[in-house]
Every structure is written in C-alpha cells, then in structure tokens.
Amino acid sequence: MWKQLSVASMCLGVLTLLAFAEQNAKTDVGKPKTATEISKVSLTMLEQESAKGVLSAKKNGVALAIKLKGAAEPERTDLEITWTLTYTGPRSPLIIVQPSLHHTSGATMAILYAVPKGKDFGLPFVVHGPIEMDGFVIDAFGDKIALPKFKGIGTLPPLDRFKMRTRTKDWFVTVAAGKSAHGVLTISASKLKEALLSKYPGQFDPKEPPRLFVDLVFNPIDRGEDFDFDAWVGELNIPINAVPALSKW
C-alpha cells in the first residue's frame, strides 16, 4: 500500500518543488520573479543536447527507445512519443509498468521545453500521468475526474481510504525473451498551448506553435506484489531531443 502512495508522492514532489521555486524566487531587490524569469533554459544548451541524438536508454537489461512525431488531425496536431521496451537480462520474461501518460502509475514524465519566437531560451512544462488524489483523478493540465464515493466509508478500515482505486493489472506489460513491447504517449497540442499561454503570458504566439524539445523520464516503482508480480523497477531517462515542428496547435 505504501508503494501505491509513493506513486502519487513522486509526481507531487516534483511539481511541489517547481511551484515552491516559482513562489519563493526573488530578485536582488526582493521583488518576486515571474515564471518566465526563473524558468529560462538556454536554447544553446537545448540545441547542443538534442544534437547528440540520444533516443534510447538502457539499465539492468531493460532498454527503452522512442521516436518523436507530430500527428496531424483536421483540427489539431498532437505530439506523439512512440516507445519500445526490450529486455536482454537474465530473468525473462520482463514484467514492468508500461510508459503511460494515461495511467495513474506516476511512472512517466515528459518535460517539454518551448522556445518563444526570436528568443534564446526555452520554457519548461511538465506533462505527467494523472494523479489520484482526494477522490479525484487530476491530469497535468488540471482537468479533474471525480471518482465514485466509497459506500459505507464510515465502516472501512482507515488505511483502505488511501488505497489507489485506479490501480489495475493493465498498468503492467510482459516482454518475453527476444521480444518487445510497444506503445504511444500522446500529448495534446491544444492543451499544451492553453497551458503555456497561461503559465508564460505574452511569450508565445497563439497562432504559431513554438519550437519544442522533450526530456523523457521513466521511473516505474510498482513491483505489483498485489497481483503476484515481481515487476522490474528502476529509472530510465532519455535526455533532451528536438520535437519535429508542429504544423499547428
């Protein structure tokens, strides 16, 4: 149960640190800095890192590889990160929480850097899987879905109220020796647009998508003991890469 709680805690910890930095950063004269001022990341650094072309990471027999593209539809363009998991370790088959920005596993985080037109810096926005908290499922853009209320909650043992209600076996994939698992992480360009315009007012053109870079963090921490699994846990980080230009957002 404590591992279930730590899933949400990991995401909340990162987001809390970012929020704390924004709220407490001060200029030399004590005036609070704007989100733009404290969040700037050098465009030169982003370009240098992305030029390395590192699109995979490997640790303890588990390899994660990605491909990036903008998937166009009639009314929008979404960012798609296609992932592949491969296992070459001695304990076949691999059982692991899959990369997902849909499940509430807390295992996947895409740190996007958006570059305002004509500027020499990028501004970050963290897209994480939804978090289950206080009876709601809350996504990276602040959208909430209410969970059904417990029936007879007054008679439930206290710890039952903190169990992750959206946790399922579907979080996990099994990869046999010599095989791979595949999937796609989709990030809504329209939601990203709304978030960037709100977080960094005056920095982005509402009609023209900015240059984007992405840093993907995959950190499965759930072994799935409740499902009689012994899932792989660890961290795989695919560093900064340029995102193909979006046609619209």
Image: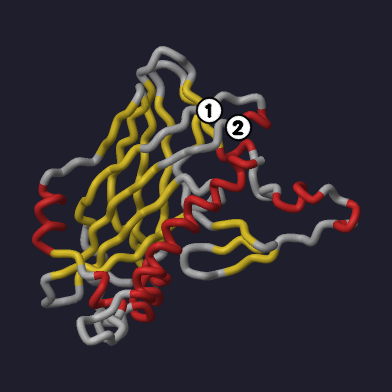
Which of the marked residues, 2 or 1, is nearer the chain's N terminus? Answer: 2
What x and y, as percent, mark residue 34?
29, 81
Q: Is residue 31 above or below residue 94?
A: below
What x and y, as percent, mark residue 230?
56, 24
Q: Amino acid at mark 2?
A: Gly
Q: Residue at x 15, y 57 (%)?
A: 46
Pick out the residue farthest to the top.
Answer: 90
Tag shown at residue 154: none
The reply to whether discs 2 and 1 touch (Cβ–Cβ < 8 Å) is yes
Out of 29 and 98, give the one closest to the viewer.
29
Left or right of 143 in this view: 163 = right
Q: Residue at x 52, y 32 (%)?
A: 173
Image quarter where the C terminus lies is: bottom left
Real-space Cα separation, disc 2 to disc 1, in angstroms:
6 Å
Image quarter where the N terminus lies is: top right
Tag shown at residue 231: 1
Q: Residue at x 53, y 27 (%)?
A: 231
Q: Is residue 8 above or below residue 55?
A: below
Tag shown at residue 224: 2
Left or right of 202 in this view: 101 = right
Q: How many marks?
A: 2
Q: Is residue 36 above or below residue 245?
A: below
Out of 119 and 4, give the one closest to the viewer.
4
> Can residue 207 be seen at all in this image of the molecule?
no
Out of 143 and 31, give the one closest to the viewer.
31
What x and y, as percent, mark residue 128?
44, 56
Helix, strand or loop for disc 1: loop
What x and y, as percent, mark residue 38?
26, 73
Q: Is residue 105 above or below residue 88?
A: below
